Amino acid sequence: MTTPLIITCAITGAETTKEHQPNLPITPKEQAKAAKEAVKAGATIIHLHVREDDGTPSQRLERFEDSISAIRTLVPEVLIQISTGGAVGVPFDERIKPLDLRPEMASLNMGTMNFGDDIFYNHPKDIERLAVVLKEKDIVPELEVYDIGMLETTFQYVKKGFINEPVFLQFVLGVPGGMSGDERNLRHAKALMDSELGPETHWAVAAVGRWQLPVMTQAIKLGGHVRVGFEDNIFLSKGVLAKSNADFVDQVVHIAKEHNRPVATLEQTRKMVVDKQHKCLQ
Ligand code: KMH
Ligand code: ZN
């Protein structure tokens, strides 16, 4: 049976600015509107970063609380996946503070890397600590993997019992410093994943900028899921700025149709991602 396609929308991110993308949602109210539009178009998970009113990236618990509550008011059923990556340079302790809100999902970045002109630090001890906290709090980790080394690290964490199967893997492709969206990278990553992890593994791609279209098409054909949104890309096609996050979701739905891939409902997503993990935690 074909696996329904889970579409995650990363509505804001930490790097995109209003100067780059005037329609970037910043305030809780703007984020709730963007989430509602994305869900209407077919997204079932919102990957959430928050900003202060002036646009500064924030990991402040109260700000997450306000955004989550605004989103829940407009789209009560959507899965919310909060970012523990934040922006580069934010201390780890600050990054994990919003986990006290007990979201259903949260990101877990699987290694340190050059991130454009910066360094995105994820010390092994912190990765381990966060994996344990997520387990204790019953929060499903979205494992962000930017290169093959991080994927192999993931296998080790699973073997050591820090992360439970079935996992939800997010291959992030195209960040300078990580693996690019060259189609051989995803093929290789998938081959390794298939040989090391169980058949219930869910995997997705979040490809950045110009890589987004070819990589998501490849993933849809291979049975993977897709993340889109202003965190990863602002152009719908070459030189054409998207008007909203939902524009990207529409684009994914269109490609899924072309490849006969049904799009997952909110209920199906919850069953595939959250209920299954929670069963394993019991
Ligand atoms: N902003 C990036 C440095 C995550 O959400 O966990 C990290 C990031 C990953 O966006
Ligand atoms: Zn993120």
Image (cartoon, grey):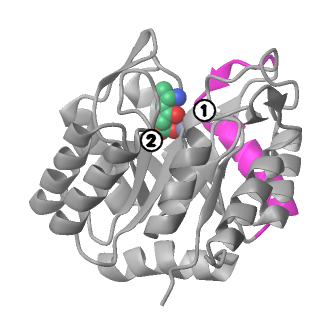
Residue labelled 2 has its Cβ within 8 Å of some atom of ligand 1: yes
Q: Dividing the image into 4 quarters, which one contains the C terminus?
A: bottom left
Left/right of residue 10 with respect to residue 81 in the rendered view: right
Question: Does the CB distance between marks 1 and 2 fall below 8 Å?
Answer: no
Q: Is residue 254 above or below residue 181?
A: below
Which residue range is magenta in the image? Answer: 54-76
- Where residue 159 appears, as percent x and y from the top left, is 11, 61
CA–CA distance in space, label 1 to label 2: 13 Å
Q: Position of residue 13 (x, y in %)?
A: 63, 33
Q: Dot 1 corresponds to which residue?
A: 210
Left/right placement of residue 226 relative to residue 71 reads left
Residue 78 at what x, y percent from top left? 70, 66
- Most foreground residue, 247 or 77: 247
The residue at which mark 2 appears reads as 172
Q: Residue at x 75, y 63 (%)?
A: 254
Characterize the local packing of mark 1: few (<14), some (14-19) or many (20 or more) Cα atoms within 10 angstroms.
Answer: some
Amino acid type at mark 1? Arg
For the point 38% across and 28% down, the residue is: 92
